[in-house]
Image: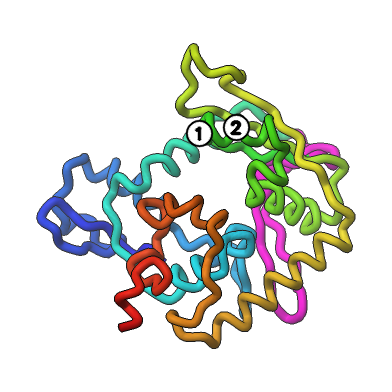
Amino acid sequence: MVIGFIDTTGRRVPFADLESGEWAYPLPVVRWLAKQHDDHGSRYGFDGLGFSVTELVAPIQVTMLKRRHEVYVQPDDGIKSALGTLMHYAIEMGTPVNDTTWLREHKMVREVDGVQVGGTADLIRMNHGSDYKLTAGYSVKKMLDKGVREGSPDYFWQGNIYSWLYGGAASWELVCVTRDHTSRTKHRPIEVINVPLLPLDKVEAYVRERVALLESASTLPDGLLYECSDEETWQGRRCEGYCEGAAFCHQYRPELSE
């Protein structure tokens, strides 16, 4: 997992010791960026083995490498996530505070085969769920053209697992805010995209399968972890700049196996 930043002198500084670093940004900005790298699993208080929905739908190899290794990154690496957090906060401000039919940032945990699974829904109201996504126009276009399941499998399964954790939602939607929208973009800057919901038993079967794969992978050394598919690596783009486990990945760095 990401445990700290690399400062302007090249020194590795743990998040707990940010005051000792030398930064290109004011310290409050650095602290804001650091919050984007909180361990997702820790927020659910698992009392045994557990995985967040984010970990469950990610490539098995990525989840295990991020769990096993301590990683230091540049502060800039958290900017996209930080902007997404600001968007979530702004949208939350638009929901009624005293209306109990609005469940905001709703944490849910269920156990499957002795393993806990936790997820946080951005909003559930009257049995209808919403997830807010700050994303690239390319991703939105893929989902509009091909549907969520093919255009963004991670978002598809996230929505279905959130619904399963909740006990079965009537509907689930993605509220997609395009961060790079221009006048030449063919879709709207904000698109609401429906996530097709599978029967709960099929979603649970998928969760059980992912849990079993993660459990079996936990006993394997790095070099024998299940390799990511071309789709999972985004044809290599994910490895080059979007994977926190890339430095320890034998698939991406074959020289580690020599």
Q: Secondary structure at mark 1?
A: loop
Left or right of 93? Residue 129 is: right
Q: Residue furthest left?
A: 9
Q: Give whichever of 104, 78 is nearer the camera.
A: 78
Q: Give whichever of 106, 235 is nearer the camera.
A: 235
- CA neighbours of label 2 inside 10 A, class few (<14), some (14 to 19), many (20+): many
Q: Quadrant of the rendered structure where residue 14 is?
A: bottom left
Q: Position of residue 57 (x, y in %)?
A: 63, 60
Instruction: Give, as a single range, the part of the protein colored magenta.
Output: 99-128
Q: Give whichever of 141, 17 is nearer the camera.
A: 141
Q: Disc 2, disc 1: CB below 8 Å?
A: yes
What's the amino acid at mark 2? Val
Question: For the point 33% across and 67% down, which residue is it?
Answer: 247
Q: Is residue 122 visible?
A: yes
The residue labelled by disc 2 is 140
Count of numbered tags: 2
Q: Quadrant of the C terminus?
A: bottom left
Q: Quadrant of the rendered structure where residue 26 is?
A: top left
- CA neighbours of label 1 inside 10 A, class few (<14), some (14 to 19), many (20+): some
Asked if 101 appears above or below 34 in the picture, the reply is above
Question: For the point 49% across and 56% down, which residue is it?
Answer: 233
Left or right of 142? Residue 70 is: left
Question: For the point 15% across and 62% down, which residue is it?
Answer: 11
Instruction: Let me know if residue 258 is in the magenta part.
Output: no
Q: Position of residue 131 (x, y in %)?
A: 66, 40
Q: Position of residue 199 (x, y in %)?
A: 89, 55
Q: Position of residue 53 (x, y in %)?
A: 64, 59
The residue labelled by disc 1 is 136
What's the amino acid at mark 1? Ala
Q: Quadrant of the rendered structure where residue 46 is?
A: bottom right
Q: Quadrant of the N terminus?
A: bottom left
The residues bearing labels 2 and 1 have C-alpha atoms spaced at a distance of 7 Å
